[in-house]
Amino acid sequence: MSASTQDTFISHLVELRDRLLRAIGAVLVFFVILFLYPGAGPIYDFLAHPLMAALPEGSKMIATGVITPFMVPMKVTALVAFMIALPYVLFQAWAFVAPGLYEHEKRLALPIIVAGTVLFLIGVAFCYYFVFGTVFRFINDFAPKSITPAPDIEAYFSFVSVEKLRDARPYFIVGAFVVAAVVTPPDVLSQLLLAIPMCLLYEAGLFFARFVKKRAEGASDYKPLNETEMERELDRADR
């Protein structure tokens, strides 16, 4: 590797770091704003409304962990902050790959960012207002009358686990290189400059998620109740 090539590679890494820091900073800013107003609790209550509306009258969700009532609303607030900051995050990703694109490809930046954000938000709204309510009502109507639904607040938002992300790694890597081959000029270097950062971000997410999971598991020695103990506690609450 020549000195000029090495300098170019290092400059790309420095720019990637700066773009990541800007994106993370934007998410943190929105997270602080949402944490102050309206607060993590109201945000969670709003997102949990489709499930609560489908439960029998008077039913509530439960928390089986000591720190779960605090950690779960915080995670949800962070997710909402990311959704709000998504246009800026997409812009930073595009700004990183734009120097290696042709002029006619660079003109696609604004349509892609706007369309990606709008379609993502439409998908979220469709799930929230139509899919979730229908699915939860069906499950509640299908359940035997002898069962008292008591969903756990953490299970409600546990869409993807670290194990599932790890199992999906090969598919993501292939998808990253396919996307890089489509949106970049027909040369190997441009494809690698887009695909490799995507794979590194995926691995970084797995790496930090592993520590978050271990910290959450080790934060308390509390053991969840088994089915017999849960039924006993519910019977005691009904009395």
Image: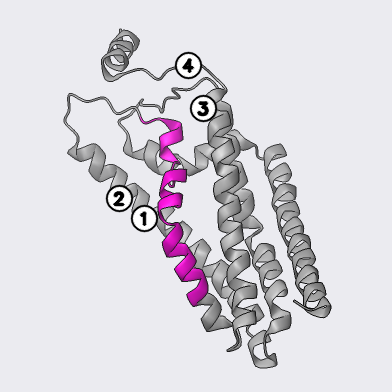
The residue at 55%/77% (across/down) is 180
The amino acid on which the numbered mark 1 sits, given as a three-letter code, is: Phe
Percent x, y of residue 125? 46, 58
Percent x, y of residue 185? 61, 88
Numbered tag placed on residue 134 in the rendering:
2
The amino acid on which the numbered mark 4 sits, given as a three-letter code, is: Tyr
Residue 42 visible here: no
> 61 and 15: which one is in front?
15
- Pick the quarter of the image with the C terminus: top left
Dot 2: what SS? helix
Tell me: 226 left or right of 46. left
> Hey, which residue is sitting farthest front in the picture?
1
The amino acid on which the numbered mark 3 sits, given as a three-letter code, is: Glu
Q: CA distance from mark 4 to mark 3?
A: 9 Å
Q: Which residue is mark 3?
A: 217
> 10 and 58: which one is in front?
10
Q: Residues within 10 Å of mark 4 (few under 14, many from 20)?
A: few
Residue 133 visible here: yes
Relative to 207, is 150 above or below?
above
The earlier-in-sequence mark between 2 and 4 is 2
Q: CA distance from mark 2 to mark 4?
A: 34 Å
Magenta stretch encompasses residue 233:
no
The residue at 36%/31% (across/down) is 151
